[in-house]
Image (cartoon, rainbow, N blue to C red):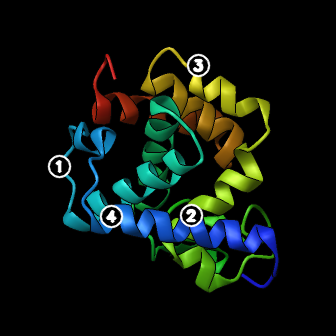
């Protein structure tokens, strides 16, 4: 990041905390509950999402929704680049959306990509409690899709992501 001051220090602290948690192999029960076969790299990205969202105090439903949407957006690939280079990272943050004013390098960093979504789309916003209070992972993923990711085909993608979440986390997930 470019800004200096308490915001930058806070973000750096989150990056350090998540990196330390990954290195220490801190348990990631939500990632461990994923029923789909994931590559080592995808599992690592899911753990990064779980730990980063957890650092901000988000609970299971939000984490399930975030992992599902990152899977749908990038295949849980932190280095994914789409939309002719405009959308980057786990959540495919575009330079005209959440990734506006965020460097390409920061959007390619898994933890920073999560922080951008959290800060621009979730913190202090009503949608966060809607997702956290969803009845299941499918509903949470659909809300995240419609109100955070906002793809072109919101209705179709929300339905697909709800089904994907139920495949990933089960009917009771």
- Residue that numbered label 1 is attached to: 37
Which numbered disc flags the more N-terminal residue, 3 or 4? 4
- Residue that numbered label 3 is attached to: 133
The image shows a total of numbered marks equal to 4
Q: Nearer the viewer, mark 3 or mark 2?
A: 2
Vertically, is 138 above or below 74? above
Q: Nearer the viewer, mark 1 or mark 2?
A: 2
- Residue 33 pos. (x, y %): 24, 36
Residue plotted at (37% across, 36% down): 164
Q: Nearer the viewer, residue 133 or 26?
A: 26
Q: Spatial distance from mark 1 to mark 2, Cα to Cα?
A: 28 Å
- Residue that numbered label 2 is attached to: 14
Which numbered disc flags the more N-terminal residue, 1 or 2? 2
Corner quadrant of residue 102: bottom right
Q: Secondary structure at mark 1?
A: loop
Residue plotted at (82% across, 80% down): 3
Q: Secondary structure at mark 3?
A: loop
Q: Is residue 21 left or right of residue 90?
A: left
Is residue 153 visible in this depiction of the protein?
yes
- Residue that numbered label 4 is attached to: 22
Which numbered disc flags the more N-terminal residue, 4 or 2? 2
- Residue 117 pos. (x, y %): 66, 55
Disc 3 packing (10 Å; few <14; some 14–19; many ≥20): some
Q: Quadrant of the C terminus?
A: top left
Which numbered disc flags the more N-terminal residue, 4 or 1? 4
Q: In the rendered structure, are the residues bearing label 3 and label 2 in contact, judged by CB atoms less than 8 Å apart?
A: no
Q: Secondary structure at mark 2?
A: helix
Residue plotted at (50% across, 33% down): 59
Residue plotted at (43% across, 43% down): 68
């Amino acid at each position: 990041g470019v800004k200096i001051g308490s915001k930058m220090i806070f973000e750096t602290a989150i990056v350090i905390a998540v990196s330390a948690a990954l290195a220490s192999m801190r348990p990631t029960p939500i990632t461990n509950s994923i029923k789909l076969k994931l590559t080592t790299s995808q599992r690592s990205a899911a753990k990064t999402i779980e730990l980063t969202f957890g650092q901000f105090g988000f609970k299971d439903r939000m984490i399930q929704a975030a992992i599902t949407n990152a899977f749908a957006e990038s295949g849980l690939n932190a280095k994914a680049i789409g939309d002719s280079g405009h959308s980057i990272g786990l959540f495919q943050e575009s330079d005209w959306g959440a990734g506006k004013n965020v460097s390409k390098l920061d959007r390619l960093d898994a933890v920073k990509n999560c922080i951008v979504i959290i800060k621009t789309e979730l913190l202090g916003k009503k949608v966060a409690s809607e997702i956290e209070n969803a009845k299941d992972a499918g509903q949470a993923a659909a809300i995240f899709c419609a109100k955070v990711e906002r793809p072109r085909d919101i209705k179709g993608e929300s339905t697909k992501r709800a089904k994907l979440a139920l495949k990933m986390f089960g009917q009771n997930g």
